[in-house]
Amino acid sequence: MTQRFTPEARGLGMTSQRARDRLIERLKAQGIADRRVLDVMRSLPRHLFVEEALASRAYEDTALPIGQAQTISQPYVVARMTSALIEHALPKKALEVGTGSGYQAAVLAALVENVYTVERIDELLRNARRRFRKLGIDNIRSKHADGKLGWAEHAPYDAIILTAADDALREELFDQLAPDGVLVAPVGKPGVQKLLRYRLVEKEAGAMWVGESLGDVSFVPLLGGLV
Ligand code: SAM
């Protein structure tokens, strides 16, 4: 992926390939083992998904502000969520709720045939679309909408990922999942959020969506309405 990028995308100094390599070593040391995810994050220029003034911090393992009181998620969290999403099978079609900077969608777009992403803040979505175009990413479809209820038009999805937290997950999201699909989302109030992964499990009473906790996380809230 690196070769076809412009010099700006390849980066220099704090945004260089060496900086990305160091981040990947850190992720590995924290237990991220999926080579597919590590390879994508090694080549994707995260510094182009933040404001220029923050570019030198893009390869620190930290969330960063992207404006409108929102953040680009911490690289470890992106790696963890993406690994959890593709662990059992590589999805062909994925839905993300909460486009933000577009970084998570771009990571998914390198692994999944078709990515759909929904963002409620128009300005963030326009910036994200500009980044997709600049990087030549053409398998992401996006919509300015409240994604609490998913994006029914393109369902079913093999994978759904929420990058903002709600107290509980809506039934409509599960309705848009394929039977062998997987949903990964932060759930709970600020300070007590868990990252949950849901898959369909056969029980005596029939198949039901069962969640497993992947650990504690801290996400911005899933909000209603459009900005
Ligand atoms: N995935 C993003 C990235 O890679 O930069 C991180 C996104 S940030 C942690 C969460 C995003 O979810 C914000 O951009 C926020 O505006 C968006 N969001 C919150 N509630 C939403 C909703 N109901 N529908 C769509 N997007 C929502």
Image (cartoon, grey):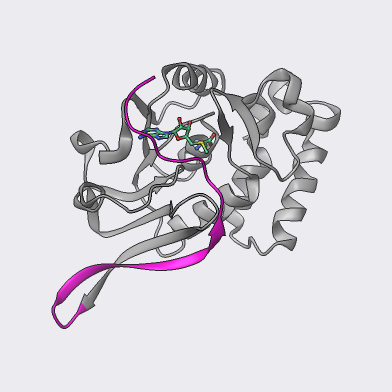
Q: What residue sits 86% from the left and 29% below the top?
A: 13
Place of residue 215 in the rendered image (x, y in percent of width and height, measured from the top left): 54, 64
Quadrant location, the C terminus: top left
Residue occupying image coordinates x 41% and y 61% = 197
In this view, the residue in front, 223 or 156, is 223
132 left or right of 184?
A: right
Left or right of 11? Residue 141 is left
State left or right for residue 157 relative to residue 84. left
Vertical comparison of 166 with 5: above or below:
below
Find residue 152 and report its horizontal and vertical position in percent: 20, 38
Q: Residue furthest bottom?
A: 204
Determine the image quadrant of residue 28.
bottom right
The residue range painted magenta reads: 203-227
Q: Is residue 103 above or below residue 183?
A: above
Q: Is residue 45 visible?
A: no
Q: Looking at the image, can residue 219 be seen? A: yes
Q: Is residue 64 magenta?
A: no
Q: Pick whichever, 70 or 124, lies toward us.
A: 70
Locate the N terminus and report the quarter of the image it occupies.
top right
